[in-house]
Amino acid sequence: MERALGTNPRTVVGFGDDVSALRLPDGKLVVLKTDMLVGSTDIPPGMTMTQAARKAVVANVSDLAAKGVRPLAGLVALGLPRNLTKVDIQSIAKGLSRAAREYGFPIVGGDTNESKDLTISIALVALTSKQNLVLRSDAKVGDTVAVTGQFGSASAGLKALLKERLPPETLAPEISQAVYKPRAELNLGLALANSGALSASIDSSDGLAWSLHELSRASNVGIVVFHVPVSRAAREFARLHHYNANDLALYGGEEYHLVVTVKPNRFNSAKRAVRGRLTEIGVVTKKSEGVRVKAMEGYSKIPMRGWEHFKLQT
Amino acid sequence: MERALGTNPRTVVGFGDDVSALRLPDGKLVVLKTDMLVGSTDIPPGMTMTQAARKAVVANVSDLAAKGVRPLAGLVALGLPRNLTKVDIQSIAKGLSRAAREYGFPIVGGDTNESKDLTISIALVALTSKQNLVLRSDAKVGDTVAVTGQFGSASAGLKALLKERLPPETLAPEISQAVYKPRAELNLGLALANSGALSASIDSSDGLAWSLHELSRASNVGIVVFHVPVSRAAREFARLHHYNANDLALYGGEEYHLVVTVKPNRFNSAKRAVRGRLTEIGVVTKKSEGVRVKAMEGYSKIPMRGWEHFKLQT
């Protein structure tokens, strides 16, 4: 698909990064992002329309956050099944509006359609200059790999709802928050980009393992993870329901933390920029070493498995 | 929906026009547009995937054409039903690519999802300055109302396919072209805006009557139509199948001509700018006179009926 759509000389970033970017005549960059939420595959059991609409925006903002770019404005195209009530549609508007306010930009236009599947397609536009844009592709051997949060809560929540068939109200608060009210880490992303300490960055919406593989592919490097950052709630859930906690953290998804690489000797300044919200998890190595995790018995490969949508997962 | 989503001081054009626009710090405007094509309601019988994908782009470009703005870049978010083949998906990519080449901009990013209904959501971005942007809202009493094409061919084609159940291959070439290969009149829109002769403009994707009512609403004026511009093919189809030809032209849709108002004494210069591709159809009047058509027996109101999607129409 990407190849067929081509590119042109103004395109600074095309397919294959969290956002796209075009150079304007004055040298500034227009940053563009689109991400679509689909009812049948992206809305977990128990999620309200307001939460779903908000999440559609969060997923888009998270990609801008990873690049260190603040959204300027958004568009929304809706596909609405005929059986939605007026209240449902008002709830969708409320969720969109709430998310836009939360991240400080207006939704300035849109399109409404009838569709068999609920569809919330968001497009964001932003402006930046090249030196502020943190890509996936500039990680270097020796850089530190770090994350802005602990992983596995969303993945535990989705497993609870879909596999264990637990009712939403039994979820621990941290897990419930991760599933129904995820946050895009826009301020963290802006502060990290602004610190000048990052060499590369990606969000973790398709899972931590997927993000590490994407950094590896785009930067042509390997990664060794020394410490898998598992959330307390995911660890507890894994113990109760006999899951592997590291797997919950690595192969989850729908979790919007940032996965970054930090230039040599800049980890402390990056960490200060986000008031401590940065955890070292590994190091960038040569491409030939692949993407691995250090375990007690040596190193093991991290397969490129990631987030699969609900319908496929159940 | 529009009210709930709010606005902000940078928003120069929000909901309610063909596009949205935001002011940048340097005074330039970022123009944004999104329009979604949905398989179950927007794809007529006999249309190929390539044609459908191309049409999704055309619908968006047409709105920029009406504002006199050239697209800078596009994004595409796809919802793909599981039963699509690899060839179908390649055809969609081909249609997108073909349309983007046709109108001279790159598609720089996108998102692919599984969905129950084929969904092609396009977002376009452009840059312009305020004086070049022709809105719906500046028509004045005494301005000339004009159009860039003849109407009714698409509407005749859809009636043939949906009501008369004629097979696609029996359609007259002009009708077939109107249904399967519509064109956005980008060069005409740019030339008209550039002539400085227009006071207002809209595209006719929801039907001529709808467009006239939108100009009336947005500019707070009335419109009298002296001449309904019916295409030869629509006239012939109406005669054969006992439809009212004027109704085909007025209440059709999915036809991408421009409906403009021209400042006093500027009609000839506007017409020269598009090498004659402009037909006078009426005049702008006071709001209280409503939207009317002059018929032999006097004036009759044009109801605000417009394009309804296929599923609703059959």
Image (cartoon, coloured by chain):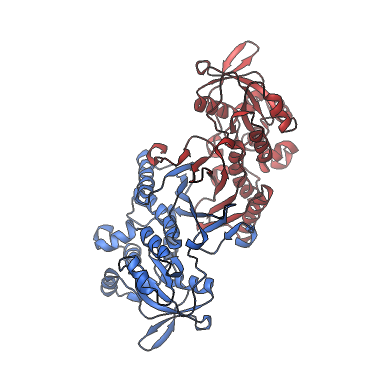
Chain colours: A red, B blue
Q: Quadrant of residue A240?
A: top right
Report the number of discs: 0
The quadrant of the image that shows the N terminus of chain B is bottom right
Residue B85 in sight in this render: no
Q: Is residue B164 above or below residue B169?
A: below
The answer to whether residue A185 is visible is yes
Image coordinates for residue B6, horizontal then vertical, percent: 64, 59
Residue occupying the far bottom of the picture: B297
B239 and A201: which is toward the camera: A201
Q: Residue at x 43, y 77 (%)?
A: B264
Q: Where does residue B2 sit, x and y in percent of width and height? A: 60, 61
The C terminus of chain B lies in quadrant: bottom left
Q: Nearer the viewer, residue A76 or B238?
A: A76
Residue B312 position in % (x across, y down): 45, 63
Name the foreground residue: B114 vs B273.
B273
Residue A210 in the image, given as x and y percentages of width and height? 55, 29
